[in-house]
Image: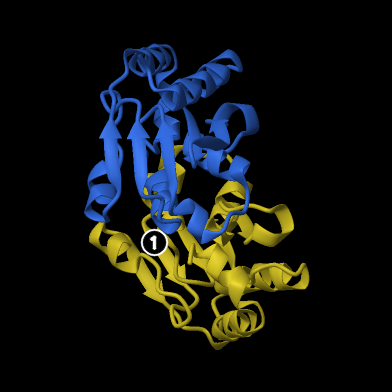
Chain colours: A yellow, B blue
Amino acid sequence: MTDPFMQAAIAEAKAGRVEGGIPIGAVLVHDNKIIGRGHNQRIQKGSPCLHGEMAALEDAGRLPAAIYRECTMYTTLSPCSMCSGAMLLYEIPRVVVGENKTFMGEEALLKSRGVEVTVVNHPECIELMEDFIRLFPELWNEDIGV
Amino acid sequence: MTDPFMQAAIAEAKAGRVEGGIPIGAVLVHDNKIIGRGHNQRIQKGSPCLHGEMAALEDAGRLPAAIYRECTMYTTLSPCSMCSGAMLLYEIPRVVVGENKTFMGEEALLKSRGVEVTVVNHPECIELMEDFIRLFPELWNEDIGV
């Protein structure tokens, strides 16, 4: 059974797909509650910065440092250097990653800084990305600066 | 004489200060032209992600990877892990830093990944930050997750 928070991140990724966007979603969890959720907004908002994790952080809004330090980020895809950097800035101590088969982010950097990284490799996360990359390789490459 | 691009970044920082925001600004430069500019939007937009550099990237909008790889980021303050991560994502090869006296960002990480980091330590950048930190230490700490 899928963790309900990963399920919520997957729901965000699917919402992005329905909008014609890149299907990556994330939720920020504090004290067993979702306090921020979002999905990649490159296509929808023309945004180079609103990856799924960044959209979830924006949705959560301004938070005291003490809250971030008790949070877990759930993201459907291994976090890139920007999203990993955001987690390091706010010292988010845990990230649960839907998959790292289609893209390997900065997991090693996160671990080297003490972040607990759990990789689920959920079939639904992999399928969402494989489909998107097959259909729109140029959009995907743009999103990861390739 | 101050580099005109650093001057433009300082103008962004001052625009932020006039708005009551955190006085950090940035411009993204390509082919000797400013293609994106912005300043920290924590206070103005309640944004945890729109640091100066991120605001400049958002302002530049969606760009092909090849353009980013020919860009220089000018920022009034040493870039935090989030903004450094964004530069690494898009492989921006050069960053000119207004100052790193009031905050030392991820310059070592950037250099270790091959980014050319030039630190100006411009008196105006230092003064803007020292004034802000003295007046609003809690807002500044929030911005760097402290």
Q: Is A78 placed above or below A60 here? A: below
Q: Residue at x 37, y 13 (%)?
A: B124
Can residue A74 be seen? yes
Question: What kind of residue is marked 1?
Answer: Arg
Q: Is B33 placed above or below A9 here? A: above
Q: Residue at x 58, y 84 (%)?
A: A130
Q: Residue at x 40, y 74 (%)?
A: A104
Q: Quadrant of the N terminus of chain A?
A: bottom right
As drawn, the residue found furthest toward the right would be A19
Q: Which percent across, then down, holds residue B7? A: 45, 20
Q: Quadrant of residue B45?
A: top right
Q: Is A28 placed above or below B116 here? A: below
Q: Which percent across, then down, holds residue B8? A: 50, 23
Chain containing the residue with disc 1:
A
Q: Secondary structure at mark 1?
A: strand
Can residue A86 be seen? no
Q: Which residue is mark 1?
A: A94
Q: Which percent across, then down, holds residue A91? A: 36, 49
As drawn, the residue found furthest toward the front would be B31
